[in-house]
Amino acid sequence: MVNVAIVGASGYTGVELVRLLHAHPSVEITCVTSRQSVGEELAAVFPSLFGRIAHVCDDVDVDLVCAKSDVVFTALPHQTAMAVVPAFLRAGKRVIDLSADYRLRDVSVYEQWYQAHTSPELLSEAVYGLPELYREKIATARLVANPGCYPTSVALALKPLLQQGLVDVSTLVVDAKSGASGAGRSAKLGSLFCEVNEGFKAYGVAGHRHTPEIEQTLSDVAGTPVRLTFTPHLLPINRGILSTCYAQFAAALSIGDLRDIYQQQYGDEPFVRVLPEGVWPNVAFVRGSNFCDINLTLDPRTGRVIVIAAIDNLVKGAAGQAVQNMNLMLGINERQGLEQLPLFP
Ligand SMILES: NC(=O)C1=CN([C@@H]2O[C@H](COP(=O)(O)OP(=O)(O)OC[C@H]3O[C@@H](n4cnc5c(N)ncnc54)[C@H](OP(=O)(O)O)[C@@H]3O)[C@@H](O)[C@H]2O)C=CC1
Ligand SMILES: CC(=O)N[C@@H](CCC(=O)OP(=O)(O)O)C(=O)O
């Protein structure tokens, strides 16, 4: 058994890690932290855990966390994560960081979109934790930067097109929608019931901080710098992301050929499902699972390809992907602890 710590267990991604790791056959949760609930049972913070999880919350004390664990998940807000991650690494722990702090390789890009970086020396070492792209590097990494939720859905939707040069990369547009759990559990005006329920709005228009992260991955895949228009929206649901991606098609291929390319690229992937023709991804059909569902078509009138991807932002978009990365780092079956079917209805 590998001992794991969840730093920031009282947040939405933290409790999702608890749910997944509790059922994982190869690990034991040995430490959970929360500043506001130190000394309290985590089951008092989340009654969903009552009778199954007896852990008491520790403070974010690096020595204590290190003494209790071999692998550390940091499920903290960005900026807060980079205040503790270097100390975990110095203590010889392997770290999977769910925040944005180590996702961008170029410190100036990070500082343009976030704030000053306090451990830029780690950016070249951190491995971007998207298994479908960087599986081999993840396996040997000390520090995995778990991707953002929107970037996961967009990268998986567009990878086959960009890898094979099938679209004009200057025409990429992504219209994405997220459930409210994407904003985390801390109290914010914009997350109040009346602000979200029965509403549907765009936010971060032409300036969302996931834009450079998406561009970094797509540029890697395309082998050329990629810029895109990315517009996120807030959906009045708890979980789920649906990303609709558009680009001008630049190849003489039929939709059948294109579907074959997607099937070939993802046929062996345990968590990417290319849906049958005419079945469009739906957040309701991935909820609680680590799946990314994808489908696509060609619009002959406009010459555009349209690719749609759905994930659960807390699973493939965060905690599930983090567990998938941990499995790779530990050299165990990538599917372990992640075989749950989606929760429907
Ligand atoms: N929600 C989502 O869908 C996704 C989130 N992420 C990223 O994962 C990380 C966690 O997100 P999420 O779970 O939603 O966030 P939450 O706000 O729900 O939880 C944050 C956690 O961090 C703790 N925390 C907050 N501030 C501090 C601090 N200054 N020092 C130490 N601990 C702190 C909180 O507990 P306490 O205040 O008690 O210490 C809590 O346990 C973030 O970086 C987020 O961007 C990534 C992908 C998807
Ligand atoms: C609905 C909502 O607010 N979503 C969050 C994204 C959550 C996420 O993945 O963000 P990180 O990069 O911090 O990990 C947002 O738009 O900021």
Image (cartoon, rainbow, N blue to C red):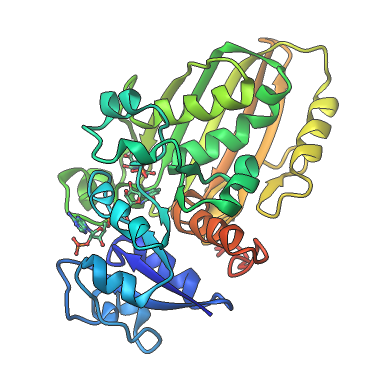
At 43% across and 70% down in the image, what residue appears?
A: 70
> What count of labels does the image hold?
0
- Give the camera-side residue of 250 and 133: 133
As drawn, the residue found furthest toward the bottom would be 51
* Residue 281 appears in view: no
Quadrant into which the N terminus falls: bottom right
Question: Please, is residue 55 above or below residue 239 in the view?
Answer: below
At 42% across and 77% down in the image, what residue appears?
A: 29
Where does residue 67 sit, x and y in percent of width and height? 32, 75
Where does residue 31 sit, x and y in percent of width and height? 33, 75
- Give the camera-side residue of 47 and 290: 290
Quadrant into which the C terminus falls: bottom right
Where does residue 273 sit, x and y in percent of width and height? 70, 48
At 62% across and 29% down in the image, what residue appears?
A: 158
Question: Which image quarter: residue 252?
Answer: top right
At 66% across and 23% down in the image, what residue appears?
A: 162
Question: Which image quarter: residue 4?
Answer: bottom left
- Give the camera-side residue of 16 and 327: 327
Question: Please, is residue 9 above or below residue 184 in the view?
Answer: below
Where does residue 18 sit, x and y in percent of width and height? 41, 71
Question: Which image quarter: residue 63?
Answer: bottom left
Q: Ligand 1 falls in which quarter?
A: bottom left
